[in-house]
Image (spheres, grey):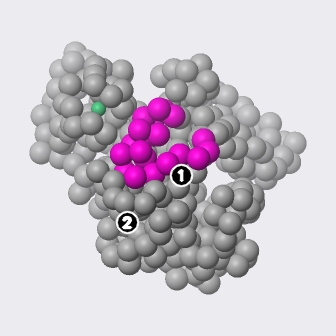
């Protein structure tokens, strides 16, 4: 019965799915990490599924490349539909945490300055509402940002007085070697083509410039402890890196990793429990109620669920 319903959903939507090969090494041989659970599909509109705070649990098949070990969703919804899904729709849930994000990012930009030794031109790719750039601007950086979601771009430009551009990185046609720093906060795992994104970043960063990436590490202690219940296992995350596969992909695109470490983010307690409901309804709801009763729902709490911070330097020459 279960199998029947799974098959019929796939059959019905086959034209919207694509089978892909490994983005890191090109192999099409893989083993299955988690089988598809399409029967759990709530059948959401793409717009809902691919917004910044999309919290749909992983229902697609997760595979591991037999040659290089990269973990990714395969088959997946076609990439043009994914990008289209990000561009429309509003996301009040995401921007409700803007204050908390600004606070985290204030620390992040100070940390980046240790490696960049300048506060020149910085680009934030997939900047959402631009909270990171707002923090960078306050510290004297010349800031640039792009984001596929038009509603977030407008919200950020209004709130922070920025000039964020809507669209993907590839739509912007930035000048070669223009930026001192490019950042990708919780973005690389969402992109249909991470190698191409890193290649483009390499092109637009000056030699010796810095690329900063934050991503959820599937090999982290918390991921391994939680297994199938890890909060970042999510149908909007198309790729699941480990320190090794991330380093490997950066190396291939002409970057040298100079720092890789756990990254603590801050969010309001009420919001964390709200997001936690997608893993455990009981814990999420109970926690949320207690936090509210103690008037702690707005309290900012640092949390770590495997987020990993990478700093890489652009080498001279061109990557593969
Ligand atoms: Zn591979």
Quadrant assignment, res 223: top right
Q: Which residue is mark 2?
A: 203
Residue found at the far front of this picture: 316
Query: Quadrant location of ligand 1?
Result: top left
Q: Taking 310 as reference, is 198 left or right?
A: left
User: Looking at the image, is mark 2 or mark 1 earlier in the sequence?
Assistant: 2
Q: Secondary structure at mark 1?
A: strand
Quadrant assignment, res 293: top right
Range drawn in magenta? 241-260
| Residue 259 on the magenta segment | yes
Beta carbon of the mark 1 residue lies under 8 A of ligand 1: no
Please determine whether, in this image, residue 154 is positioned above or below residue 246.
Answer: below
Pinpoint residue 208: horizontal percent, then vertical percent: 52, 63
Please determine whether, in this image, residue 141 is positioned above or below residue 316.
Answer: below
Q: Residue at x 31, y 39 (%)?
A: 24
| The label number, if any, that marks residue 312 in the structure image | 1
Pinpoint residue 235: horizontal percent, then vertical percent: 39, 39
């Amino acid at each position: 019965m279960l199998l029947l319903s799974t098959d019929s959903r796939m059959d019905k939507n086959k034209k919207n799915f694509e089978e892909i090969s490994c983005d890191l090494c090109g192999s099409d041989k893989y083993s299955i990490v988690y089988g598809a659970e399409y029967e759990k599909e709530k059948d959401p509109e793409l717009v809902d599924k691919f917004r910044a705070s999309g919290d749909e649990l992983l229902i697609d098949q997760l595979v591991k490349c037999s040659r290089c070990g990269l973990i990714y969703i395969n088959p997946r919804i076609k990439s043009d539909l994914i990008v289209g899904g990000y561009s429309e729709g509003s996301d009040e849930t995401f921007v409700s945490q803007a204050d908390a994000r600004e606070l985290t990012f204030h620390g992040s930009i100070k940390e980046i300055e240790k490696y960049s030794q300048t506060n020149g031109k910085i680009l934030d790719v997939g900047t959402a509402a631009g909270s990171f750039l707002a923090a960078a601007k306050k510290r004297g950086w010349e800031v640039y940002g792009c984001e596929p979601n038009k509603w977030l771009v407008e919200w950020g430009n209004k709130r922070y007085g920025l000039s964020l551009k809507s669209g993907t990185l590839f739509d912007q046609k930035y000048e070669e070697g223009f930026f001192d720093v490019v950042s990708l906060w919780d973005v690389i795992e969402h992109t249909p083509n991470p190698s191409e994104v890193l290649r483009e970043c390499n092109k637009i960063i000056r030699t010796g410039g810095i690329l900063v990436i934050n991503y959820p590490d599937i090999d982290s202690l918390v991921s391994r402890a939680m297994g199938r219940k890890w909060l970042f296992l999510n149908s909007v995350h198309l790729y699941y890196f480990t320190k090794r596969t991330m380093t490997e992909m950066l190396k291939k695109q002409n970057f040298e990793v100079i720092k890789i470490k756990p990254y603590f983010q801050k969010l309001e307690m009420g919001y964390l429990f709200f997001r936690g409901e997608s893993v455990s309804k009981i814990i999420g709801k109970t926690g949320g109620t207690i936090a509210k009763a103690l008037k702690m729902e707005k309290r900012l709490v640092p949390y770590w669920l495997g987020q990993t911070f990478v700093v890489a330097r652009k080498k001279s020459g061109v990557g593969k």
